[in-house]
Image (cartoon, coloured by chain):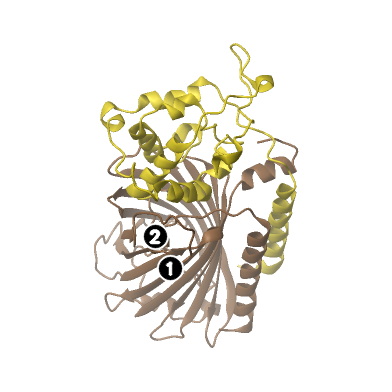
Chain colours: A yellow, B brown
Amino acid sequence: MRACPAPVLASLGFLIISMCVAGQDKARSCRYHWDAQVYAELTKAPAKARAKRNPLEHDPDAIAAGRNLFEQHCTECHGDFAEGGRKGPSLLVPEIHDAQPGTIFWILTNGVVWRGMPVWSKLPEPQRWQLVTYIKSLGVVEPAPALAAPPGGRSNSATALPSPLR
Amino acid sequence: MTLSSVRLSFLFLVLLWSLAVLSRTIQAQENPYIVAYDHYLEEPGNLEVEYFSAFGTQRGGNDFHAFWAEFEYGATAWWTTEFYVDAQSTFGDSTLFTGIRWENRFRVLKREHFINPVLYIEYENTNGADKILKEVEGHDVEADYAPRNAVLRQEHDHELEFKLLLSGTHKGWNFVENSIATKNLSNQPWEFGYALGTSRPLALKASAKRCSFCRQNFIAGAELYGGLGDRYRFGLHDTSHYLAPVVAWNLPADWTLRFSAGFGLNDNSHRFLLRWGISREIPGFGSMVGRLFGGHR
C-alpha cells in the first residue's frame, strides 16, 4: 500500500481546526425545540424506579458535587444553567421539579436514546444521585412570554435565566 | 524509534493539542479498555480524537512501535462511527503507513439492562505489516510479525469484522465480553476471537471540588483477549492470548490518558505489549459542522 499519510492528516487536521474555529464565535442562540412529549419520558419510569429514595439527599456535599458533574457532562446539551440548549430541553420546568428523585435517576440511567439522550449508567450510582440532588435543587423558571409555546405548536425553550443558580 | 515514526507521532499530537486549545471543555468519563469495548457510545454530536501507541517485543525479529489515530463521532445516541489511520515503525527496519479502518457500533436496546448488547461492524483495508494489535483473532501468532516490513507489506487485507459487544455495569463495576468474527474478503475462512474486560473507578462518589488527582478520575481494570482459530480449526490451538492491566485517567478539560501493560500468556504471544493513548473529546462537533454549511443543528 503506497500512501503518504502526512498530507492527508494535515488536510484533515486543518479541516477539523477550521470547524472548531467556526464554532467558537457563534452564540448558542439556537435552542432545543421542545414540546410536552420530551417530558413525557418521565412518566415511563416504572413504579419501582420512581419509589427509589435518594441516599444522598441530605449529603452536604451532594449539590456541589452534582453541580460539578452537571458542568462536566450535561451543560453541552442542557445549557450552562440547565435552561436548555441546542440538543436538550430545559430542566427548569415544573415537570422536572415535581418529578420524584427516582424518576430522574431512572432517566439518567436509561437515557432517552431514540431522542438523543445517551445512557449515563457509566457514571457510578452515587454520582448519578449527586446529579439528581443538584437537579432537584434547581428552581423553576417560566418561559419568557414572547417565547412561550403557541397553542398546539412548538416553541423555543425558556431563556429567562435565574442568575443565582450556580 | 525512527525519525519518521517520531514525526508521525508528533503530527498526531500537534493535531490533538490544536483541537484541545480550540475546543470547549468538558470532562470525559472513559473506561480504560484499549482492546475491549463496553456498550457506551460516543455522545451524539461529539468527536473524540485519539492517539495510541503500542510498543511490542518480538522474538525472531525486531521490536516495534505501532501507532494509530482514531476519530470517533457520535452520530446519534445509538450509533457511533469511527475512522482509524494505522502506522508502525519496526526498529532497525522501517516506518510505514499500514492502513485504515472504519468501524460502526449500534446500540440495540432502548433501555439499560443488566447486559447490554451492541453490534459492531468494521471494514479494514490494511497490509500485513499492521501491528497495532487492536484485536487478536484466528491464528494470529507472534511469528506472523517477525518478517521484515518489505515482506509483510506485500500482503493486503480487506476484511469485514463483526463483533457482538456485551457489557453491563453493576455497583460501579463494568464487565464486558466481546465476541469477534472476521471475514477476509480474499476468500479466506472466517476467523474468531474474544476480548473480556472489567473495570471500576477508584471512587464512586464525586468530589465537591474540581480536581485532577481525585480518585474518581482514575478507572482501573484488566482485559483479556486472544484468538479462537478459524472456521476449520476452531479452538485454542495455535492462537495467542494476552492479559493486560489497564488504567484510565480522566482529566478535567476532557483529556483522557490510558495505559495498558499486556503480557503474552503462551508461547505464541508477544512477551510484552505496552500501550498508551491520549484522547480528547470535542463536544458539539456535529453542530460546528452543521453551522459551517449554513445549518442550525
Residue in the image at 28% along x and 36% along y: A53
Comparing A9 with A62, the one in front is A62
Residue in the image at 55% along x and 35% along y: A88
Residue B90 x, y percent position in the rendering: 52, 81
The answer to whether the residues at label 2 and label 1 have Cβ atoms under 8 Å apart is no
Q: Chain of mark 2?
A: B
Q: Which residue is mark 2?
A: B216
Select label 2 or label 1 by which is in front: 2
Label 2, secondary structure: give it. helix
Label 1, secondary structure: give it. loop
Residue A133 appears in the rendering: yes
Residue in the image at 30% along x and 62% along y: B229
Figure quadrant of the C terminus of chain B: top right
Comparing A157 with B33, the one in front is A157
Indicate which disc, 2 or 1, sits on the residue closer to the N terminus.
1
Q: CA distance from mark 2 to mark 1?
A: 29 Å
Amino acid type, mark 1: Leu
Outermost residue toward the bottom in this view: B92
Q: Is residue A71 above or below residue B186?
A: above
Q: Chain of mark 1?
A: B
Residue A119 appears in the rendering: no
Q: Is residue B239 above or below residue B288?
A: below
Callout 1: few (<14), some (14-19), or many (20+) C-alpha neighbours within 10 Å?
Answer: few
Residue A106 is drawn in which quadrant? Answer: top left
Residue A32 x, y percent position in the rendering: 60, 31
Q: Which residue is mark 1?
A: B133
Q: Is residue B221 above or below residue B181?
A: below
Amino acid type, mark 2: Gln
Residue B14 x, y percent position in the rendering: 66, 69
